[in-house]
Each structure stands twice: as structure tokens, then as C-alpha cells.
Image (tube, coloured by chain):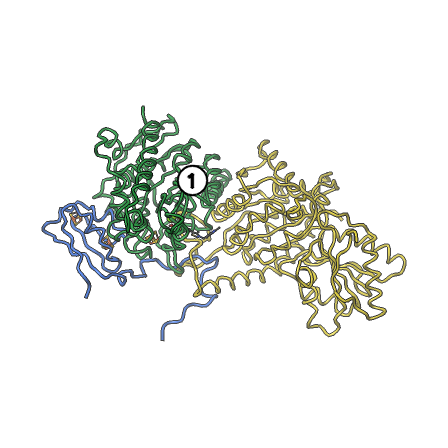
């Protein structure tokens, strides 16, 4: 059985939100995933700029695509100046 | 009885409210003019112009923005005040619902005036009583002194840790707002001590206790989208806060009595000669003064009449009202409003419903009148008492329990 | 300080290492540029950790705070649809008064977000009042040209002839019968400290404008074009391209207004077209990929309507050229 939602006594007053959105994984929405050709990639970060979901992380040296949140919109692939991202259909 | 050092001033109800807000050390006052409230804004503008207050006075472009600015200010931790009337209250209605639901302890003075149309600026409680389901605490004043006393109390009630709800203070248009009365004001320092400094409500988010306040040190999200899975729970919390306001309203009324020498019953109702009464009129606001005058005269003639004034309309004191009225043979509820298409007005329905579970239910008749500022002559109330006596004697009820008075047939 | 003197440039490799104050896990549609708007605004702020947000009802608000979740790591408040600038007025007033009383130390920065529904229509009064009163806040209007959140009804920002659920396409009416509102000019006419148009594709320009708007003393307004594939009906990966074309066709020229010098100036992307008018693309290039203009092309090409759309676009562009001429 699914865990019961908290009662009115257990939630904060004034309807203040209490969970970070990052606890909600939007990666489930995806039907295509971005695959990057790391050789071709110039690390220009244009994909990072445009990703509406902040699903691309930059550690100072390289990028990672965060599949927990990537919704598979394809904007990164569309905007990549060297066309090194391909959108691949999820299994 | 006046306790301590107090200043006697000849002022009207609006000015009394403005002085109270000034003494309450209001941080933000966002307000828009409308008769018969305007004197409050104008008086406050004088305080601001003279540098007598630290208040940030936001001269907004509408009442909707007045209440919206109050909501923002209260959410940022400020003590917040605004005032309005009829059309202004109606325009801010959307924000009125919102303010209470997100627990913003704003004080709103309502100079009661008729709704349009026809457009009319005079006394009528239709608009304020229509706010009864907005989840605000609602206090009705009988005179300018009570308006001053109640406004100061309102800040304490609103900001009380157990409550954290906004409060409306109602004063009848012109009858109170524009009529000069002798009003005693507390010394500034006494008033300041009474209201204290606002402490935002504490909430628990992720196991941490933090203030309900827009503050970069403790970021929170106020006003999310809550649907069928959580909305109802938030509403029940709101309901519980309103219930917790009951003892708070009474204890602050007691505290005030010690400080000022003035007490308004138990904070909810004030009764006059009800103990052995055969006929009691229940009413709110300045009308209570007129009815008390009539009751006193009739008592002098040996007639067993009484008055029950309802000061706090929300939370409604159903138990207390029923306790007092149970066993009274006939009760007349007079309201300066009407509810077209309903059996009776808001006060009538509350009173009758409060008595439903009692064994000795009185006959309850309802009266609408005084709308649009129509003068309420003492004769009308004498007539009501007469009708109540007739009901007691004959046991016969009119075909409809509620009717209009004070109009031309 | 005139905003022209604010020379901040986004250094992307540094910025990309900063914390996201608007996080993942929000529930805007896949590919919704409003998400990019919110992210880039937060990254462009001078003091994101010391900023309070007032957000009007709309897709961004709804999708970012579905109870019990929130995508915001700064103090954030939504109250209603048309009053976000009025809420902000109160927040500013609260801090001012409490600083005066010694109850608060520092004034936070204030940011207001709204869609075109509030920014162009129902919230104009509150915004106009707040700008008139000179509250110090940055107002970012993300314009997706429709009431998207409530199911794509027309707004004052919806383009002429566009289909929407309240400007249907039929025999009597070819979509929305009237032209859009010049909202950025309307706010600029209030003489705020700063006003600008922006496009999400031109992200550097947009981020610079956000920085200027927030650093300017007094009210600032940015009208940013942020397409919505559900209402515009283009392929979801084309969001940035659609905002680019809006600029290249001069339907949405980029300019800014400095309240101190009281002058308008064209921003780079539009200045290029002013210098080389041959670069101005025909409006059809923006209209055709959008399903909401399908009836202008199919089943029969409506040259009459396309011509009229082009004429009005040119007329507006000429107007912008006139006011930005120095
Ligand atoms: C007073 C009021 N009227 C209508 C609505 C319904 N409503 C909520 S959001 C919205 C449209 C929002 O459009 P926009 O501002 O463009 O934001 P978008 O959803 O497009 O991002 C409407 C009509 C409301 N919430 N409040
Ligand atoms: S846009 Fe393309 S080239 Fe640039 S960093 Fe992203 S994947 Fe690499
Ligand atoms: S597909 Fe969309 S969501 Fe996923 S990383 Fe690319 S831009 Fe971001
Ligand atoms: S409807 Fe449009 S604006 Fe709203 S979330 Fe979806 S794409 Fe974005
Ligand atoms: Mg919109």
C-alpha cells in the first residue's frame, strides 16, 4: 500500500511548501534521451544555457546529463553549435 | 471607569481608529480612500507628514493593491494595517480570502457602507457581513471609543501565536466614522507595551522550525498550488486557528479592561438586562446603542426587555448566545443588512441555528432595516419589543419570520 | 547610475558552476522556455541569495510549486494573478519600515515574475501603480503570447490572426482579430529606471538586462519573449529558434530604455538589422512553423492577411527605429 499522505496536523501551517522539487523526478516523462558525442563536444555550454530543466551539470571540466530530470525535449540537441547531441528513443 | 493616565479627545470613529493604528506602531499602511473611511487615510497621512510614525505609507492605486501590498508586507514580517469600505472591500475581496488562508495577521478597519447600487455612501453592514466566510476574525464596534479599543486589541489578537489570522474591525459609516465623541486614548508608551513587537508565526519545514516570513536567511515558498490531495487539510488548519482565537479574544479583552478600565462583555457578546427578560433584541454595531436606550426606557416602565449585542461575529459565539437566549420567550434579531432569497440575514441565521439544539427554544423573529443609511429611530425598536411581547402572549408567529422595517410601505 | 554604465557580462563557465536557485524537478512542459527564463534570471541576479520573489499566477508559478514541492531556493511568494507587483510593494515597504525601526538590517532585492496574462492584461493596473510609486523591483514578464496555464486563451500579447481557444479560426474570424499591445513601451512610458525587451534565444543580452534592471535604482521592467509550444504549436525542440525568429523578423525587436537619460537604444541583435536591413527576415518565416497560424497557409494561402501582418510588423519596427535613433 502506498504511504499515506500526512494529516492536517503534520503539514506546516499556511500551506507553505515543504519538499524540494528535486525530490520529484521528471526524468520519467522522457521518451527520448540526449546522447552527446564527447569527442566532438567543445564544452561551449550552450546546451547548459538553454536547458529549461537545469538537467545539464558542469563540474568545471565536463558536462553530465542528469537523467533524473531531463525531460527529453531536444532543445540541447537543436541548439548545440556543433550538432554533437543526438536524441535517442528510450527503450 | 478610566484607569491610569489617559487623554480625552473629541474625535470621530475614523480618527479613533487612526490614532489606534498609530499607537500600534504599524510598519506598513497601504490604503486607498473611500467614503466613509477616508478620514482614516487622511489622518494617517498627517501622522506621516509630521514624521510622527515610522510607518511606510503606501498610497496604492486601488483597494485590490492595498490588500495585496498588506499581504506582501505581512509576509515580510511587518505589522500591517489598512482600511476601506463597501466597494473597496468588494474590490479587495479576492485578496481578503487569500490573506487569511495564508495566515497574514493584517488589521482591516471597515467603515460600513452600502454596496452599490444605487450608489450610496451611508451606513449598512451588508458588505462586511458578506465577508463572513473569508476566514477573518470579525469585530463590530458600537461607538468611537470601542473602535479605538478594538483596533488596538485587533493587532494583539491577529498576531497572537495561537491565532495568526487577519482581523476586521467594523465601524458603522457616518454614525461612528463621522460623529464626534469623547474618546479616551491610552498613553503612547502604555499602548506600545500592550501591542508589543510582531513575531511572525513559527512553522515547521523539513524538521526545522522557521518563521513564516519572506527572509533570505530562511527561504520559504508561500502560496503554492495545492489541489484535491492537500487543499482541504490546509483549510482545516485555518478552521482550527479560528477556533483557537476564541480564548484569545476573551483574554485580550480582559487584559484591556485592566489597562483601560473598559471591557466589552466577554469579548464576544455584551448583554443588557437579559436575565429575566421576556423579549430580547439581538443586534450589532451602533444600533446596540439605540436599542439599549429604548430598553432602558421600557425597563423604567417595568417592561422586561433586554439587549444582546454581538461584538465578535467571527468566530461566532454560538454557545454563549444560546446560553443567554435559551428560555427567553421571544427574541428579535435586528440586522442592518438583508439576505435576498434567504430565510433571514446572517445574524438571524446564526442566532436561530445556535438555539436549535436547546430545549427551551425561543421564538426568533428577524428584522432588516436601516439599509443605505436609513435613520433608525428608537420607535422602531419599541415596535419590535411590542411584537415580541405579542408573540409571547399569543404564541402566534407571523407567516414569515423575517421582515423589513424602517421603509415606506 | 545610468544603466548603460552597468557592464556586467555573463561568464558562462563560471556561472554554470553556481547553485541553481530555480531547481530541476519543476513541472513545466518538456521544452518550455519559461524554465530557461527563470534559470537565467536567477543566474544573472547580482545577489540571488538575497533576493525575494513575488510570482503571479501562471505556468511558471503553478509548475514550480505543486504542493508539497517547490523549485525555489529563495524566499518566494505567489498570491494572485494580477497583484504580484503590489505584493512586492508591500514587501519592500515592510523591509524599509523595519530597517527604520532597527528590526531588520538589510534591504533584499525584489524580483517579480509574471506571464503576459498579468503583464499585459489583468495586472497592468497594479504594475503601473507600483512603477509610479518607484518601488525598487525588477519585473520580468515572460511573454508566451497566451494564457497558457488555463488552456491557451488569447491575451493582449497574442499576435493578430493567431488561433487560441478564445480566438478560434472560422468563416467569420481568422483567429485573433486585433494587434498585440506594445506593453514594453507602455511601461517604459512610466519612466522606470530601466525597461527592455528581450528574447530567450539572445541569452547574453537577456542576462545583461536582468543585471541592469536589478542594479538600477527604482523600478525596472523586462519583457522577454518565451515561446510556448503548446499554444504556438511548433515542435518542442524549437523554442529557442522561435524566439530567435521573432527578433529576426522584427516582430519582437530588442531595445532598452534608460530612465536617467530617458533614451531608448537598440540592442545588438536588432541593431544589426537596422544597419543591414537586408537581414530582416520576412514575417512568414516566423509564422509558418507555428500551428496557430496554419490557416494563413493552408488549405489556401491567405496573401491578404500575410500582407497585413507584414505591414503592421514593419510599422512597429519603423516606430522602434524612430524612437531608438540617437
Ligand atoms: C482573477 C483571476 N482571473 C482568472 C484567473 C485564471 N487564470 C489563472 S492563470 C491564467 C492565465 C495566465 O496566463 P499568463 O499570465 O500569460 O501565464 P502563462 O500561464 O501563459 O504562463 C488565468 C486566466 C485567475 N487565477 N485569477
Ligand atoms: S552545446 Fe554541444 S558543444 Fe556545446 S557543450 Fe553542449 S554538447 Fe558540447
Ligand atoms: S533534452 Fe531538454 S531537458 Fe534534456 S538535457 Fe536536453 S535540453 Fe535539457
Ligand atoms: S503550456 Fe506552454 S508555457 Fe505552459 S508549461 Fe507548457 S510550454 Fe510552458
Ligand atoms: Mg502567457
Q: Position of residue B144 (x, y in %)?
A: 71, 45
Per the image, the residue denoted by label 1 is C107
Residue B26 location in percent, x, y? Answer: 56, 43
Compared to B331, does B48 lie above or below? above
Q: Quadrant of residue C262?
A: top left
Q: In the depicted view, which residue is nearer to us: B161 or C134?
A: C134
Determine whether, in the image, residue C313 is placed left or right of residue A61: right
| Image quadrant where one finds the C terminus of chain B | bottom right
Residue B5 visible in image: no
Tell me, what hue is chain B? yellow
Residue C153 showing in the rendered view: yes
- Dividing the picture into quadrants, the one containing residue B272 is bottom right
Give how far across and how far down residue B304 sits, in percent: 85, 62
Colour of the chain lettered A: blue
The residue positioned farthest toward the right in the image shown: B301
Nearest to the observer: residue C22 or residue B76: C22
Farthest bottom residue in view: A1
Q: Is residue C268 left or right of residue B272?
A: left
Chain identifier, colour green: C
**Which residue occupies 68% across, 58% down?**
B268
Does dot 1 land on a helix, a strand or a loop? Answer: loop
The chain to which mark 1 is attached is: C
Packing grade of label 1 (10 A; few <14, some 14-19, many >=20) is some
Residue at 73% x, 38% y: name it: B10
Question: Residue B295: horizontal and vertical position, in percent?
Answer: 83, 56
State the residue in front, C217 or C244. Answer: C244
Amino acid at each position: 500500500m502506498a504511504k499515506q499522505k500526512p494529516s492536517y496536523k503534520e503539514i506546516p501551517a499556511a500551506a507553505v511548501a515543504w519538499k524540494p522539487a528535486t525530490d520529484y523526478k521528471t526524468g520519467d516523462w522522457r521518451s527520448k534521451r540526449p546522447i552527446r558525442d564527447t569527442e566532438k563536444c567543445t564544452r561551449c555550454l550552450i546546451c547548459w544555457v538553454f536547458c529549461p530543466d537545469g538537467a545539464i551539470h558542469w563540474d568545471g571540466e565536463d558536462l553530465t546529463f542528469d537523467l533524473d530530470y531531463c525531460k527529453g525535449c531536444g532543445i540541447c540537441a537543436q541548439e548545440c553549435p556543433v550538432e554533437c547531441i543526438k536524441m535517442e528513443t528510450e527503450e | 471607569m478610566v484607569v491610569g493616565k489617559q487623554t480625552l479627545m473629541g474625535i470621530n470613529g475614523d480618527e479613533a481608529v487612526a490614532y489606534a493604528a498609530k499607537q500600534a506602531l504599524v510598519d506598513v499602511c497601504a490604503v486607498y480612500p473611500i467614503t466613509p473611511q477616508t478620514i482614516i487615510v487622511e489622518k494617517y497621512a498627517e501622522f506621516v507628514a509630521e514624521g510622527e510614525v515610522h510607518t511606510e505609507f503606501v498610497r496604492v492605486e486601488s483597494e485590490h493593491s492595498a490588500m495585496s501590498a498588506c499581504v506582501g508586507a505581512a509576509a515580510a514580517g511587518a505589522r500591517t494595517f489598512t482600511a476601506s469600505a463597501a466597494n473597496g472591500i468588494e474590490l479587495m475581496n479576492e485578496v481578503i480570502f487569500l490573506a487569511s488562508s495564508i495566515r497574514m495577521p493584517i488589521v482591516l478597519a471597515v467603515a460600513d457602507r452600502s454596496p452599490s447600487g444605487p450608489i450610496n455612501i451611508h451606513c449598512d453592514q451588508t458588505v462586511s457581513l458578506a465577508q463572513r466566510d473569508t476566514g477573518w476574525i470579525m469585530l463590530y464596534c458600537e461607538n468611537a471609543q470601542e473602535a479605538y479599543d478594538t483596533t488596538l486589541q485587533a493587532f494583539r489578537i491577529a498576531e497572537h501565536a495561537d491565532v495568526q489570522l487577519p482581523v476586521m474591525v467594523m465601524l458603522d459609516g457616518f454614525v461612528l466614522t463621522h460623529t464626534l465623541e469623547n474618546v479616551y486614548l491610552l498613553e503612547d508608551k502604555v499602548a506600545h507595551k500592550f501591542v508589543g513587537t510582531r513575531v511572525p508565526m513559527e512553522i515547521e519545514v523539513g524538521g526545522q522550525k522557521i518563521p513564516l516570513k519572506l527572509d533570505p536567511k530562511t527561504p520559504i515558498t508561500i502560496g503554492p498550488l495545492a489541489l484535491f490531495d492537500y487543499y482541504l487539510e490546509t483549510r482545516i488548519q485555518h478552521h482550527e486557528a479560528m477556533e483557537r482565537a476564541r480564548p484569545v479574544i476573551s483574554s485580550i479583552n480582559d487584559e484591556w479592561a485592566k489597562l483601560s478600565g473598559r471591557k466589552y462583555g466577554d469579548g464576544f457578546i455584551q448583554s443588557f438586562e437579559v436575565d429575566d427578560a421576556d423579549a430580547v433584541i439581538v443586534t450589532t454595531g451602533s444600533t446596540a446603542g439605540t436599542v439599549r436606550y429604548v430598553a432602558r426606557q421600557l425597563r423604567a416602565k417595568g417592561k422586561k426587555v433586554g439587549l444582546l449585542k454581538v461584538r465578535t461575529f467571527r468566530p461566532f459565539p454560538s454557545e454563549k448566545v444560546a446560553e443567554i437566549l435559551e428560555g427567553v420567550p421571544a427574541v428579535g434579531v435586528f440586522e442592518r443588512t438583508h439576505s435576498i432569497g434567504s430565510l433571514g440575514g446572517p445574524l438571524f441565521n446564526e442566532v436561530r441555528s445556535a438555539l436549535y439544539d436547546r430545549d427551551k427554544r425561543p421564538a426568533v423573529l428577524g428584522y432588516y432595516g436601516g439599509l443605505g443609511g436609513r435613520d433608525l429611530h428608537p420607535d422602531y425598536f419599541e415596535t419590535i419589543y411590542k411584537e415580541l411581547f405579542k408573540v409571547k402572549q399569543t404564541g402566534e408567529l407571523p407567516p414569515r419570520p423575517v421582515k423589513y422595517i424602517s421603509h415606506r410601505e | 547610475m545610468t544603466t548603460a554604465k552597468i557592464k556586467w557580462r555573463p561568464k558562462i563557465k563560471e556561472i554554470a558552476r553556481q547553485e541553481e536557485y530555480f531547481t530541476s524537478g519543476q513541472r513545466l512542459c518538456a521544452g518550455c522556455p519559461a524554465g530557461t527564463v527563470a534559470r537565467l534570471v536567477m543566474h544573472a541576479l547580482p545577489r540571488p541569495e538575497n533576493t525575494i520573489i513575488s510570482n503571479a499566477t501562471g505556468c511558471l508559478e503553478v509548475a514550480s510549486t505543486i504542493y508539497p514541492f517547490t523549485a525555489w531556493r529563495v524566499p518566494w511568494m505567489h498570491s494572485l494573478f494580477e497583484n504580484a507587483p503590489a505584493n512586492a510593494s508591500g514587501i519592500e515597504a515592510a523591509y524599509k519600515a523595519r530597517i527604520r525601526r532597527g528590526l531588520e538590517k538589510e534591504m533584499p532585492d525584489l524580483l517579480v515574475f509574471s506571464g503576459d496574462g498579468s503583464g499585459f492584461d489583468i495586472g497592468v493596473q497594479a504594475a503601473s501603480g507600483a512603477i509610479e510609486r518607484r518601488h525598487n523591483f525588477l519585473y520580468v514578464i515572460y511573454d508566451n503570447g497566451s494564457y497558457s496555464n488555463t488552456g491557451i486563451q488569447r491575451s493582449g500579447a497574442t499576435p493578430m490572426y493567431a488561433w487560441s481557444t478564445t480566438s478560434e479560426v472560422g468563416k467569420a474570424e481568422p483567429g485573433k482579430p486585433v494587434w498585440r499591445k506594445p506593453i514594453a513601451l507602455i511601461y517604459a512610458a512610466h519612466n522606470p529606471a530601466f525597461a527592455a525587451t528581450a528574447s530567450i534565444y539572445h541569452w547574453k543580452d537577456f542576462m545583461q538586462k536582468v543585471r541592469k534592471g536589478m542594479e538600477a535604482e527604482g523600478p525596472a521592467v523586462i519583457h522577454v519573449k518565451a515561446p510556448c509550444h503548446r499554444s504556438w504549436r511548433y515542435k518542442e525542440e524549437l523554442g529557442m529558434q522561435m524566439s530567435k525568429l521573432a527578433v529576426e523578423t522584427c516582430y519582437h525587436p530588442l531595445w532598452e530604455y534608460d530612465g536617467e537619460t530617458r533614451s531608448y537604444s537598440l540592442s545588438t541583435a536588432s541593431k544589426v538589422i537596422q544597419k543591414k536591413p537586408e537581414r530582416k527576415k520576412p514575417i512568414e518565416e516566423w509564422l509558418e512553423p507555428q500551428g496557430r497560424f496554419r490557416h494563413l497557409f493552408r488549405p489556401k494561402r491567405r496573401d491578404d492577411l500575410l500582407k497585413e501582418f507584414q505591414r503592421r510588423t514593419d510599422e512597429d519596427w519603423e516606430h522602434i527605429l524612430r524612437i531608438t535613433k540617437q
